[in-house]
Amino acid sequence: MTQTNSDGAVPPDSEIARNASRHPIEDIADEMGLDETDLDRRGDGVAKLTWEAIRRQRNEPADGTLVLVTAMTPTQRGAGKTVTTIGLGQALARQGESSVVAIREPSQGPVFGIKGGAAGGGYSQVLPMEEINLHFTGDIHAVTAAHNLVAAMIDAERTHDDELGIEPDSVVWNRALDVNDRALREIVVGLGGKVNGPPREDSFLISAASELMAVLCLATDIPDLEDRIARILVAYDTDGEPITIADLDCVGAVTALLKDALRPNLVQTLEGTPAFVHGGPFANIATGTNSILANQLGLRLGDYLVTEAGFGADLGAEKFVNIVARNGPAPDVAVVVATVDALVKHGEAMLERQQRIQQADDDAGENHVAVVRAGCENLDHHVDNLRAMGLPVIVAVNRFPDDTDEEVRAVLEHCDQRDVPAAVSTVHRDGGAGGLELAERVRDAAESGVTSLRHSYDPSMPIDEKIRAIATQVYGADDVEFTPQARDDIETLTALGLDDLSVCLSKTPASLSDDPDEAGVPFGWELTVRELYPSAGAGFVVALTGDVLTMPGLPADPAATDIEVDDDGTVRGLE
Amino acid sequence: MTQTNSDGAVPPDSEIARNASRHPIEDIADEMGLDETDLDRRGDGVAKLTWEAIRRQRNEPADGTLVLVTAMTPTQRGAGKTVTTIGLGQALARQGESSVVAIREPSQGPVFGIKGGAAGGGYSQVLPMEEINLHFTGDIHAVTAAHNLVAAMIDAERTHDDELGIEPDSVVWNRALDVNDRALREIVVGLGGKVNGPPREDSFLISAASELMAVLCLATDIPDLEDRIARILVAYDTDGEPITIADLDCVGAVTALLKDALRPNLVQTLEGTPAFVHGGPFANIATGTNSILANQLGLRLGDYLVTEAGFGADLGAEKFVNIVARNGPAPDVAVVVATVDALVKHGEAMLERQQRIQQADDDAGENHVAVVRAGCENLDHHVDNLRAMGLPVIVAVNRFPDDTDEEVRAVLEHCDQRDVPAAVSTVHRDGGAGGLELAERVRDAAESGVTSLRHSYDPSMPIDEKIRAIATQVYGADDVEFTPQARDDIETLTALGLDDLSVCLSKTPASLSDDPDEAGVPFGWELTVRELYPSAGAGFVVALTGDVLTMPGLPADPAATDIEVDDDGTVRGLE
């Protein structure tokens, strides 16, 4: 049962998680039609599915409904997609549907950095929260190990005979660690003389940003994993020809390190709904959503598979439709999470642009209804995009404790006027009970069967045209400007025959445009593409529109300093 | 059943492991008096013990016999200590004893580098061999993650306000990865401007060399782990005062990352003998043996706990007696593994020194009996040392396929003349059946009850005297020479109040002396101590007598290139 403290506040996540009663994982599996032998146990309440179970499911029809939870352009506070995803899964289960939740694995970087845990929150969490937020089943560690083995192979090749003729400045494969560590962003390796060298500039990225993580989330079996690993481009030789992991002769070793990580991890939500927590790629330079294998299994084992994609719908949902759905199951229904916090931010920007108010601060502390209404334009943009992609869309207003009734009502009225089904969600405070109306809307949409997915581009289009399609149709840009570097990169990628891949656009999540300071719905702007590079194993070309930080840093007062362990092993301070 | 190929050779390790029938891990636990709820399952055939099971065992008497398997000065080929340890455990079980094996967790560095797997070999292996050699239960990954979190905290402190006043050149805490990667031995971090810096010289060590790994193997519960972590010295401030992990305010976070890794991992040998595979510290700058917790559990749950310590007895057994046994259970019986290969190497050196032969090569391809006899002097040195430490000693001649009967007989005769119990071991080829005579000798020694452990020094002695005691009594040096740097270091350590710790001497394993080219028993030499540093969390002072490579490199043709994965996930080439 959910309960609030004497002051009406929801207790800390870790307290809720600690006091939760968990079903044996065999019972969760049993509800899904799996038996004990299908489980490879990984600690209390956690199991990887066996290959036999995964293979057996291949023969079952994947006839469940895939619900993709995405968001309007979020603020720093976050929209609450993970909480909504878990809460919606719980709500569907309360309504008698067999629902399965699928989310990403938390990275230790943010857990010990700014963000804290990533296993949901309040009464919509996945359990065991502590294990999921720490090493869990070691999948991310496996990516780290595999990534760094490839790096060591590259430099060992350079130290020894270098038969591959690696051009030192062309090494695009860096090193990886699952930690927020700014000191590793730019480094020099191979110092100390001939035996360690030759030296070169290098960098570490956080493991979630490794192409191997993207590959893990897109591969559907071991041969597919192996093929993708083999294709990954790590450097160029002195003639400018690409060097791949296959050339390094360690595809088998890398596959051996990742084969168990490829199997989805089964856990449960606070209300006993089955949940796959599996994979965790970046949402800007990669797909930002959990593994295809987890989605496939959920759609075969349940009637509803609720999953999420990172950032706002312009990034996460676009990539889901144009990349993920080309490699695996496509969404049937989209849920766009809106928050009063985000609506106010975007509304202020819109009103300011319209000069209706002088200073955004004027409204501080007051009822923000007018601002909220103005902010709905950002929400509408995302809703319209998703409808244009052929998806039925539901708006979920993720209500925070400080939101007023008037603010929330304003959003619902706005959606009603535009004929967009909407529901308030209080799943953080109330668990599945706070998502019943949302679940109802989702079921209505699913049963209407109007989904007819339309991709934003055809992969056979030239790279610049594919980018233009996303920029104009999804972001609302007038056009795209390519820097000379970007033009060169497109030429190189085309010469390498990689021009028929999907495009993974890396853009700020804070704005629909490429300028993080432009809230609301920016207009009359051009997207600037600065640089492109191939993720040939993942099967897409990454186009950068700004600086991407692939290695976060620790803040002055990191979350790590709040964590304590009791003598019995209980961890405190992990929120 | 053991079986050999048509040519009489033992099949590859991975083939034997793959064809082995494994008991359910619950049955293995049951034999030890543990029940299913004491196990925290980590994949098929692997379990961590729960804290409840570990705590319950605290109340049981630790009355088993601890058998420490060590070796004469080994060659590059290795003496086969792990194989002997596992085989002896199996042999004792065949004789009706309840025996438990405890060994270290394999590091991925050597697995993909030169050495290959480290889960025993032939018919004396631990299972599941593939999992144990890859990520296993993630303990080493946990050490990597914890180690690098501390490093990130140090540099974040430097980037932000640096209230601790860290002197950049004094940072002694580096970074860690479980990979052989020479390019990471000497690096520069923090480049790219103020936001990433300030820059400084840094290095990566392989995770097994992390002080956190040493701490994990010495700590006996969570409070002890936490205390040791807090004491670890990471840098000095501008006044020369030490900065610890406690000062960085992340003791709780590091403990949270290591708390599960502290719990021993239960697996089984090929013959179903219970085995703990837990921890894996370096044998030169640390203790080189598995965790104390695993030993304690084995001694409570079984009549015999067979374990091993790294390198020859001058290093591994000395550290076990003088460091490990001061923090946990002490050995009751020592087994010294001898090989004809090593005896020939040392014999040649002895004969050459005595000018009885002109060229060692003269004997190549011939019967090496005379050389083997001469080489016994090295073996005797180790046997005498262990006897001086109060331990009953058994020599195990680990027979290789190319050893002749005459050579093996020569060793047995030599031991017989010196009244040292000895037995031939063929546990690689024959499993436990090849170690029955050895087991018999071990049981005789255990039942004789003559053990009366004598440490080589008292920790209250001055640091230089402790080193002199090891050098003269154990290595056979005439005296010890301290470089000016070493003298300075001793002064600093004494000023810091760390002079009452044990001493962990780092010396080449290839010779009894500090010169790796001096085989046999060198005489008339002085040990040169170059540098000292504290491992305050582990509780010892490390004294370096030569260069220590804490980050191995990959060879020109690494083991990684031999590994393949079948479509069903079976790994091949992991030997």
Image (spheres, coloured by chain):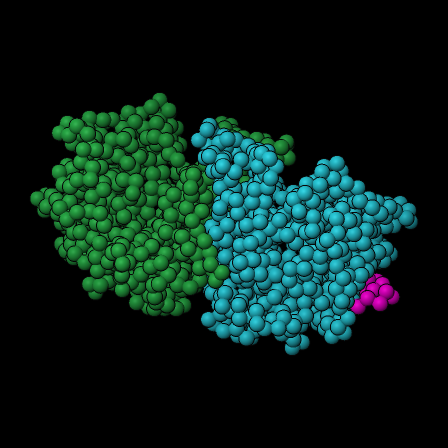
Chain colours: A green, B cyan
Q: Nearer the viewer, residue B366 or A126?
A: A126
Whether residue B135 sits left or right of residue A339 in the image: it is: right
In the picture, which quadrant includes the C terminus of chain B? bottom right
The picture quadrant where one finds residue B292 is bottom right
Whether residue A372 sits left or right of residue B365 in the image: it is: left
In the picture, which quadrant includes the N terminus of chain B? bottom right
Q: In percent of the image, x 53 and y 47: which residue is there?
A: B246
Examine the rendered structure and indicate whether residue A182 appears above or below residue B432: above
Extreme-left residue of the structure: A417
**Residue B472: image x %, image y %?**
81, 51
**Residue B363: image x %, image y %?**
84, 51
Extreme-top residue of the structure: A484
Please tell me how many numbered marks the rendered image carries.
0
Does A189 appear in magenta? no
The picture quadrant where one finds residue B122 is bottom right
| Magenta highlight range | B410-421
> Is residue B60 visible from the viewing direction of this image?
yes
Q: Nearer the viewer, residue B193 or A31?
A: B193
**Residue A377: image x %, image y %?**
16, 37
Majority secondary structure of magenta residues: helix
Examine the rendered structure and indicate whether residue B446 appears above or below residue B210: below
Examine the rendered structure and indicate whether residue B8 appears above or below residue A385: below
